[in-house]
Every structure is written in structure tokens, then in C-alpha cells.
Amino acid sequence: MNALQRDLKRLVPMVEAAGAARVAADPHRQKLHVQPPVGWLNDPNGLCQIGDEYHVFYQYGPFDPTGGVKHWGHVRSRDLFHWERLPVMLYPDEPFDCHGVYSGSALVEDGMLYLYYTGNVKRPGEYDYIKQGRGHNVCLATSRDAIHLDNKRCLMYNQDYPAGLTCHVRDPKVWKKDDTYYMIQGARTKNDVGQALIFESSDKINWHFRSRVESEKPFGYMWECPDYFETDGIKILSSSVQGLEGKEWADRNVYQSGYFLVDGDILDSYKLSPYHLWDYGFDYYAPQSFEAEDGRRIHISWMGMPDCEEYTNPTIKDGWQHCFTFPREVFIKDGKVCQKPVRELDAKKQQLQDVQNKLTQSGCPVYEVNVDEIKENHFQAVLSDELILDYENGRFQMHFTTKSKTFVSAGRSLRYAEVGTLENVKILADTSSVEVFVNDGEFVFSTRYYPNDYKIVVHSPSAHITFDKIQ
Ligand code: FRU
């Protein structure tokens, strides 16, 4: 262990202990969602299952609720519901990752945990840190017990990537097929075009560039956090895209997270479908998935938005910011990619109401509401008087009555998706978040919100409406 790692290992728990009382006093701490003990959280990293435990790591800035240098925080769970906090797994303590242990993924083999991540390095000087001055290195950390780090090393530097790229090449996601290991990374070309790069290896250590994955026409300037997987026979390339502007993107978030369906072989000849968003809400970025041992594709995202000036999170004043989405299962229904909260949630629900037409419930912050058999698109739900979910002119909308930064919205306004016929709506609410699954999760909307009093009123003539408290 080097001296910096030794000191950071002592310092981070001290900072966590010093901030704990202030964070715990915040009424907007979440009950179901992974959140940082203090400071800042962004992307989910290294999602995996080892035996009967799920391990989740997160981009963690313990020293600053508005960001700071990134570590890998660590939690584990047996039921994807209760999360146990473990010591920080990776510190920015080597020359190859000293400005941040950036995002990456996990590979579990023979009980060993292999964590591939981007070591971020910023050289001192007058650089733009896009075309010059930055190192984005592929690094590998290994652990025998998934808690203690055995070893960290750097496997690739920018000079090992193909020509024509800026310094921005990051977020390795690794998988194994037959006897070969594959790695996909996100990249920004010198012409400001986003793409993904595929590398291959026969030993997990020595990697060779294999191919680029590109859209037919340029699509954004940077693809972050790429993920490639197959589920129910459908091939999905997920990526968080920066630089989509104008027309259909004008009313949306500053950056997008979505996926292309892959027709053909991503390693050879393929065609990408149009891009579909994973989520149409305000707070959703950089999702990652893994396959659970029972075959489910589980998907977790950062419930936040980088570089966002439009809205904020008042938890900053209490010393913390951001959380993850509740884990979701990705599945295919009638050829469409859908999402739903993991089924482990069902065991935690207690039904309080089962009604038709109209439902009102007050005083319960953590709940699930299901509205089924919606007739003629007639639906409206109002949460804590200020967050409205409704259907108008072919659109499902999520909007706030006021976008004042001091109200429930903390600056959020309106998001929508074109939805042909509204069939059903599931609302999963926690103390300061709402995730809405429309038409069996074909469309999803996630947002943070900051009520003082909890209340939901649903109107949907002739529909079947249930309210379940979650505990
Ligand atoms: C996405 C991202 C990644 C990067 C990480 C740094 O939110 O920008 O591309 O690895 O966050 O925290």
C-alpha cells in the first residue's frame, strides 16, 4: 500500500463520520435507494453478483457534495433492497489514476473480482483537457474477497488507442464470450463525433484494439459509459450521449442515456437502430447493467444529471447529493425493451388501498401506486400538490406546478414522451424521488423531488388503482 492510499484510507472515514449527523438530519434522505454517506455520488460501476451477494460500486466524491476527485464507493446486498456500506474500494492514489478513479465494470472469474476502470490524469499546464493534457488510462484492480484490494495496475494508455481520437476514451465495460474477453469503451473523435471502441484479449491483461462501433450519421460528440448485452435474444448497445442538440432534443435533458438495437454482429458487420431513451425524466444518466445468476438483466442508473444548470438538489446544503435508481429488470415485451423495478420489491409491499376511479393517500413517503386498465387515456396523478403526471395530446407528461428552485421541483419543469395509448402506470416513490413506469415500463420517467408533506391523488375514471406502502 502506498503512503497516499494509507492516508486516504484514514481520511475518508473521518470525513464520513464528521458529516454523518448533518446528513442524517436531512428529511430528504432516501429509504430504498443507494446514496452516498456524505459528499457526491454519480455513475454506478462494477455491478456484479458473487455467490448470493450483489456488489455495487459508485463514483464517489467524499470531500465535496458538488463533485471532487472520484473514488469507488462500495455497497453490497442480498436482496437488491437493503444495502450494506463497505469501505471505499478504489482511491485515486497512483500516478495513472490521480485525478479520479473513473467509471468501469466488473468481471468475476473463479471467485476473483476484476475491476476495469478509467484512470483520469490531468497534466498541469495550459490545456483544453479534451484534445490535449489528459490521460484516460485503462486500469485493472483485483480482489480475492471483493472487499480488499490486492493489486492495481495500468493496462493501456491513450497511445494504445486507435488514431483520430481526443484524450476522451473511457468507461471500459468487459465481458467474456467463448474463450475471448471483450472490452467496450466510449470515445470522442478529434472531429467531435461520439463512438465506441471494442478491444479484445485472451488473458484479461493484454488488450488489442479490434473495431469501432459507429452510428450511420454522427450522433453527439461523446459516448460515455457504453454497455453491450443481449436479453431475450435482442442485442442492445447502451450509451450515454453528450452533444445532442436542437429539434427533438431541445425539450430534454442536457445529456441523454439510451440504446441502439443491434442488427447483426457488433464485432463484425451490424446496423444500429434509431436511439431510444432509457428514461424520459429529469434525473437519469450513465446506467450500467449486469446479468444476475438467475438470468435477469439488472439495470441501475445514476438518478442525477451532470452539467445541469436548470435544476438542482437542495441536499447539497446538508452535505450530500444524488442517488441511484431503484434496480430495474430489463425485459422484452412484444419486441419492445421494457423496464420494471426488480421483483424483490414485491416482498416489501403492504397494500393499503385497492379502489377504482380515484385514490387519495397522505402521510406516506415510500410507496408504489399501480394504475391498471386505464380508459381512453384518462389519467392524472398529483404528488405533494406540485408534481403532476398526466396524459395530454398524445403525450405522457411529468411536470411541476412551479419550477422555482425553492419548491418541490428545485427548478425542474416539464418532460414528456409521445405515447400512443396509455394502458397502465406504476409509480415508485421514495422520500425524494419518483420513478414512473408507463405501459409496463416501455416508457420510464425518473425525477428527484423535495416535498415537505407527502400526498398523492390519482384520478383515472374506471381504472383499477392500488396503493402499497413499502417497508
Ligand atoms: C459519466 C462520467 C463518465 C466518467 C465519470 C467520472 O457521468 O462522466 O464518463 O467516467 O462520469 O465521474
Image (tube, grey):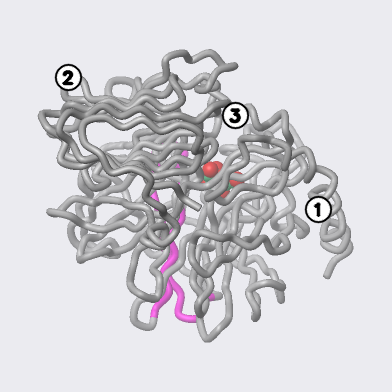
Real-space Cα distance between discs 1 and 3? 23 Å
Judged by depth in the image, the label closer to the viewer, 1 or 3, is: 3
Q: Are marks 2 and 1 in contact (CB under 8 Å)?
A: no
Judged by depth in the image, the label closer to the viewer, 2 or 1, is: 2
Please state which of residues 125 and 427 is positioned toward the viewer in this rendering: 427
Is residue 168 visible to the viewer in this orientation of the structure? Answer: no
Real-space Cα distance between discs 2 and 1? 51 Å
Question: In the image, 61: left or right of 442?
Answer: right
Q: Which residue is the site of mark 2?
A: 393
Q: What secondary structure do most residues of the magenta stretch adopt?
A: strand
Crowding around mark 2 (Cα neighbors within 10 Å: few <14, some 14 to 19, many 20+) is: few
Say whether residue 186 is magenta: yes
Please state which of residues 423 and 257 is positioned toward the viewer in this rendering: 423
Residue 313, label in figure: 3
Badge 1 marks a residue whose secondary structure is helix
Q: Closer to the N terminus: mark 3 or mark 2? A: 3
Q: Residue at x 62, y 45 (%)?
A: 41
Please state which of residues 22 and 217 is positioned toward the viewer in this rendering: 22
Q: Answer above or below: position of 384 versus 214.
A: above
- Tag 2: residue type? Asn
Q: Answer above or below: position of 55 versus 118.
A: below
Estimate the x, y position of residue 116 in percent, counting from the top left.
56, 65
Estimate the x, y position of residue 37 in percent, counting from the top left.
70, 49
Real-space Cα distance between discs 3 and 2? 31 Å
Look at the image and give the residue range highlighted in magenta.
Answer: 180-204
Q: Which residue is the site of mark 1?
A: 12
Q: Residue at x 18, y 50 (%)?
A: 336
